[in-house]
Image (tube, rainbow, N blue to C red):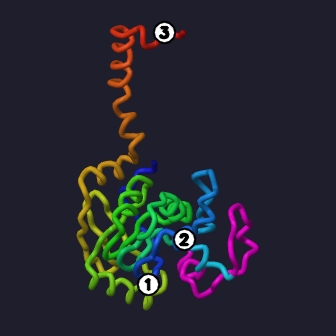
């Protein structure tokens, strides 16, 4: 997993509450067996004017020009600004995969669905919870200022606005450590590889019959 420390990026707004995981990545794309390639299908039913299917060439599909992710002013944005209860619905891990594959690295919202919130950390995404009034202010700024960008400093748990205002956010210390060091559960386990190898070696010595082939 890629480490997360500092992010300086434009913001793409999604002014909708209760965005569920089926909206983030519709159910038909769960048939894709790879872990990558979901980016073109992010918010598929909102981004395109025709129904999408797995492994389809999205470059030939008609797009919804009113949807923010399709607008040139937000091209290359790595920060998603949205409303409350983002990521509700089913617990599919494919939803953060699609966001990450499209290029999103941080999501700012007043609240997140619990399972989706946890899945973000496991897949290199930083979900930031800010007060509703601050969210309103950010939406207004994005609307009025083309190219509006924020700086996020995970180490200091700060969002830096263009006017130099610093907004603090909370994060679980363990999840912060994992993001800063690019560690998911597998990565955390592998940091103890020497201890694991030593244990397995000792176990073979003490219980050799467990490893005998019939």
Dot 1: what SS?
Answer: loop
Identify the residue under disc 2.
76
Left or right side of 170 for 143: right
Nearer to us in this view, 67 or 167: 67
Dot 2: what SS?
Answer: loop
Q: Which residues, given as a range, are shown in magenta?
A: 50-76
Nearer to us in this view, 74 or 68: 68
Is the residue under label 2 in contact with that under label 1 (CB below 8 Å)?
no
How many residues crowd mark 1 within 10 Å: few (<14), some (14–19), many (20+)? few
Residue for point 44% across, 89% down: 143
Q: Depth-wise, is mark 3 or mark 2 nearer the camera?
A: 3
Identify the residue under disc 1.
15
Q: Is residue 7 above or below residue 185?
A: below
C-alpha span from label 3 to label 1: 61 Å
Q: Is residue 47 above or below residue 41?
A: below
Identify the residue under disc 3.
212
Residue for point 45% across, 76% down: 19
Query: Outermost residue, right direction?
Result: 60
Residue for point 58% across, 80% down: 46
């Amino acid at each position: 997993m890629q480490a997360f420390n500092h992010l300086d990026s434009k913001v793409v707004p999604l002014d909708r509450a209760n965005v569920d995981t089926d909206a983030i990545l519709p159910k038909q794309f769960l048939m894709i067996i790879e872990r990558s390639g979901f980016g073109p299908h992010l918010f598929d039913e909102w981004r395109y004017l025709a129904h999408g299917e797995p492994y389809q060439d999205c470059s030939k599909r008609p797009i919804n020009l009113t949807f923010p992710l399709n607008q040139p002013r937000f091209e290359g944005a790595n920060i998603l600004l949205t409303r409350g209860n983002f990521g509700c619905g089913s617990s599919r891990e494919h939803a953060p995969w699609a966001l990450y594959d499209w290029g999103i690295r941080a999501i700012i919202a007043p609240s997140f669905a619990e399972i989706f919130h946890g899945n973000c950390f496991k897949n290199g995404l930083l979900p930031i919870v800010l007060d509703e009034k601050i969210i309103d202010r950010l939406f207004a700024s994005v609307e009025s200022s083309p190219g509006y960008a924020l700086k996020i400093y995970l180490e200091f748990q700060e969002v830096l606005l263009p006017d130099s205002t610093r907004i603090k956010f909370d994060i679980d210390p363990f999840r912060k450590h994992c993001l800063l060091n690019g560690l998911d559960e597998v990565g955390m386990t592998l940091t103890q590889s020497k201890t694991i190898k030593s244990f397995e070696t000792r176990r073979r010595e003490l219980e050799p019959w467990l490893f005998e082939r019939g």
